[in-house]
Image (tube, rainbow, N blue to C red):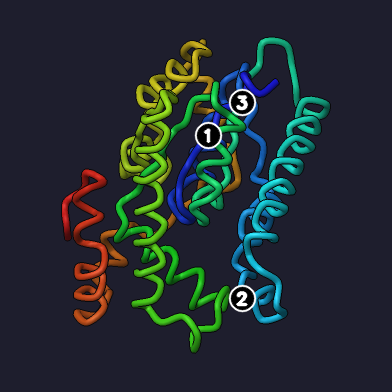
Amino acid sequence: MKNKIHLILCPDRTGSTYLRRALTLHKNVIAPPENLQIKHAILAPRNKKIYLDEGVTWDKVEPVLHDCFRTYMDRWIDFMAEVYSKPGGIFILKQVGWVEEGWAINELCDIFNKSKFLIWKRHPFDTVLSQEKRWIKSNYFDSKNKSFKEICELSLIFWDRILEAKRQYLDKGIEVYEEKFENLHGGEETRLDLNVLNDLFEFFDVGRLENNDEALDRFLTFKFVRKRKKPEDRWEKLSNEKKEIVRNVLGNITKKLGYGVK
């Protein structure tokens, strides 16, 4: 089963749901919604301080957490095989929490050492603007506890770990492919670049779509395909102070990811 599972690696707010739904257009691809419980399992080590405050040494706790993560992944794989599996199909899993803790990268390399990994990118400046809208304006985080600069710094950590994951996967001989949200989306409100999508399907060894027009018509019926503000519109409305924060915090990582600095 594991040799039929491939992974998408990306931070939050990178258009990964857009990608996941696009991947479901292929008859031999199963791209289920992300499992938030797996994300919680990965984030469990963030409770390190709690254990230390209670006198428990971390070297005793960490191996157990890793073992729990592996066990949970095995159970989840069995569940998907039972519920979703179809002859000749492959699974492509989207899980934005994969890289939020560095140790999870090593675990994934070992668990899915025969899998292919898609590193999904979006301009870090646009990612931050999307995060601000979600985290502050929707009270996803208390705005008093998460400043705009802290959101940028958190984004930097995630992108650094994406690049670290890429290095580790390549070092271990794991096949890696990179693509940008901007290339698949194409910049128009409901556009889907089928050439880019078909290149992804070829990377995952399922072949190109049989009928591009039919696939595009089906994609446009998905509820999440709706009008959104363009990133450049949101950027122009940002204060000069916030623009300077974004440039200072994310300028270098933006260039490393292959984007220009706004």
Query: Which kind of residue does numbered mark 1 sit on?
Result: Cys
Measured in 3D between alpha carbons, the distance from the residue under mark 3 to the one under mark 2, in whole angstroms, is 34 Å
Question: Which image quadrant is residue 248 in?
Answer: bottom left
Q: Which residue is mark 1?
A: 109
> Are discs 3 and 1 less than 8 Å apart at CB?
no
- Residue at figure coordinates x 35%, y 54% from the top left: 160
Q: Which mark is residue 169?
A: none
**Residue 215 place in picture, x, y as percent:** 52, 23
Residue 98 vertical placement versus 170 (above, below): below
Work out whether residue 63 can be spotted.
Answer: yes
Measured in 3D between alpha carbons, the distance from the residue under mark 3 to the one under mark 1, in whole angstroms, is 13 Å
Q: Closest to the observer: 223 or 246?
A: 246
- Residue at figure coordinates x 68%, y 49% from the top left: 38
Q: Which residue is mark 2?
A: 49
Observer-side mark, 3 or 2, equals: 2
Looking at the rendered structure, the secondary structure element under dot 2 is helix
**Residue 76 place in picture, x, y as percent:** 75, 38
Q: Closest to the observer: 73 or 226?
A: 73
Pick whichever of labels 3 and 1 is earlier in the sequence. Answer: 3
**Residue 144 place in picture, x, y as percent:** 49, 89
Q: Which residue is mark 3?
A: 5
Q: Quadrant of the N terminus?
A: top right
Pick whichever of labels 2 and 1 is earlier in the sequence. Answer: 2
**Label 3: how many residues lie within 10 Å, few (<14), some (14-19) or many (20+)?**
many
Q: Is 99 on the left or on the right of 61, as rendered? A: left
- Residue at figure coordinates x 38%, y 20% from the top left: 199
Looking at the rendered structure, the secondary structure element under dot 1 is helix
Measured in 3D between alpha carbons, the distance from the residue under mark 2 to the one under mark 1, in whole angstroms, is 27 Å
Question: Which image quadrant is residue 41 in?
Answer: bottom right
Residue 229 vertical placement versus 260 (above, below): below
Query: Which kind of residue does numbered mark 3 sit on?
Result: Ile
Question: Which image quadrant is residue 233 in?
Answer: bottom left
